[in-house]
């Protein structure tokens, strides 16, 4: 039995002749402890897929099972790092994380909860901003609060909806490593939604493209046979990285061209440029 399973999932919005199918025939199995990345085009239904798995939305048809039980509503077992932060504006950075920790660990004392909150805020380098409210934060800082909040809840499965897109290069690279460190330590099951092919290859066990819709569906999987832990700096010289990256990009460009020929709307290609974020940052430091 798969840890997470989607069976013939379909999602439509609207009713009658105005109904619009977003996702169609979504079949996916993720094993316990596995790290899977869904990569696709902007506007192809990736966020809708996360909302369905998290329980924020219900499928129009089909079934979603988590540990063999149908998903019905949200649960602390499936923590979501949202793309749009979803912070409570009247609470401080500390309070936004505290409220999630309190809900997730009702049997822990105040001191234990405080230690959890502060450790995760320190992990994302937000200790100096602990008493600030969201309106006083930059977009990247807000996203780091959202990352800390979800990881502090210690969910059994981590769902990530393009969580690092608003961050600067150095912070993005550091948080990728922190998320991987937590995943490797606790072997939490993880699903990453991204439009960055390199990010997916660096973090995941396998990558599955989402073919753009309407009626978007999953394409063939690409297994990442690169030994862990992975070194960002060395990846660009890794033959397996080059091979799998070229295969994924070729497939995405193929389905992108096919979709643009058959639909009036066009799709934005995922981020296809090679990256060496840490080396680039270090080079700038040496030059300054």
Image (spheres, helix red, strand yellow):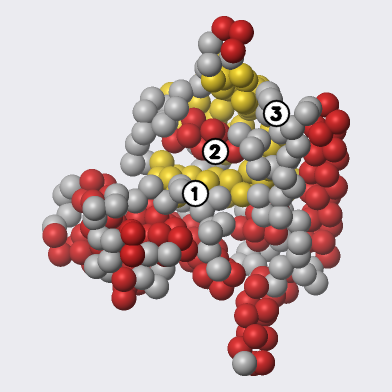
Q: Position of residue 222 (x, y in %)?
A: 74, 45
Q: Is residue 256 visible?
A: yes
- Picture quarter containing residue 39? top right
Q: CA distance from mark 2 to mark 3?
A: 13 Å
Which residue shows up at 68% across the image and 79% down it? 280
Query: Which numbered disc covers residue 230?
Result: none
Q: CA distance from mark 1 to mark 2?
A: 9 Å
Which residue shows up at 82% across the image and 61% down it? 242
Q: Position of residue 165 (x, y in %)?
A: 56, 57
Which residue shows up at 64% across the image and 67% down it? 230
Q: Is residue 151 visible?
A: no
Q: Earlier in the sequence, mark 3 or mark 1?
A: 1
Contact (CB < 8 A) between labels 1 and 2? yes
Query: Which numbered disc covers residue 83?
Result: 1
Q: CA distance from mark 3 to mark 1?
A: 21 Å
In the image, 222: left or right of 111? right
Query: Which numbered disc covers residue 213?
Result: 3
Q: Position of residue 240 (x, y in %)?
A: 80, 61
Query: Which numbered disc covers residue 47?
Result: 2
Few, some or many residues within 10 Å of mark 1 (<14, 14–19, 20+): some
Q: Nearer the viewer, residue 7 or 161?
A: 161
| SS for callout 3 | loop
């Amino acid at each position: 039995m798969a840890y997470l399973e989607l069976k013939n999932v379909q999602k439509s919005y609207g009713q009658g002749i105005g109904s619009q199918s977003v996702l169609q025939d979504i079949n996916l199995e993720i094993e316990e402890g596995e790290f899977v990345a869904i990569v696709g085009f902007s506007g192809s239904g990736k966020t809708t897929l996360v909302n369905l798995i998290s329980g924020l939305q219900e499928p129009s048809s089909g079934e979603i099972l988590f540990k063999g039980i149908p998903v019905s509503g949200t649960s602390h077992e499936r923590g979501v790092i949202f793309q749009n932060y979803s912070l409570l504006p009247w609470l401080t950075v500390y309070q936004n994380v505290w409220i999630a920790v309190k809900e997730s660990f009702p049997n822990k004392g105040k001191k234990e909860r405080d230690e959890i909150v502060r450790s995760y805020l320190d992990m994302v380098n937000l200790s100096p901003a602990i008493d600030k409210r969201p309106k006083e934060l930059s977009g990247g800082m807000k996203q780091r609060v959202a990352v800390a909040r979800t990881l502090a809840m210690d969910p059994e499965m981590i769902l990530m909806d393009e969580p690092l897109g608003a961050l600067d290069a150095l912070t993005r690279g550091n948080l990728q490593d922190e998320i991987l460190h937590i995943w490797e330590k606790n072997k939490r099951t993880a699903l990453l939604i991204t439009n960055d092919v390199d990010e997916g290859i660096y973090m995941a066990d396998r990558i599955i493209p989402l073919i753009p819709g309407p009626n978007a569906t999953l394409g063939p999987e690409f297994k990442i046979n690169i030994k862990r832990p992975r070194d960002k700096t060395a990846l660009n010289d890794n033959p397996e990285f080059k091979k799998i990256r070229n295969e994924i990009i070729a497939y995405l460009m193929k389905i992108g061209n096919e979709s643009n020929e058959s639909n009036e709307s066009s799709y934005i290609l995922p981020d296809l440029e090679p990256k060496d974020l840490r080396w680039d940052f270090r080079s700038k430091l040496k030059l300054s």
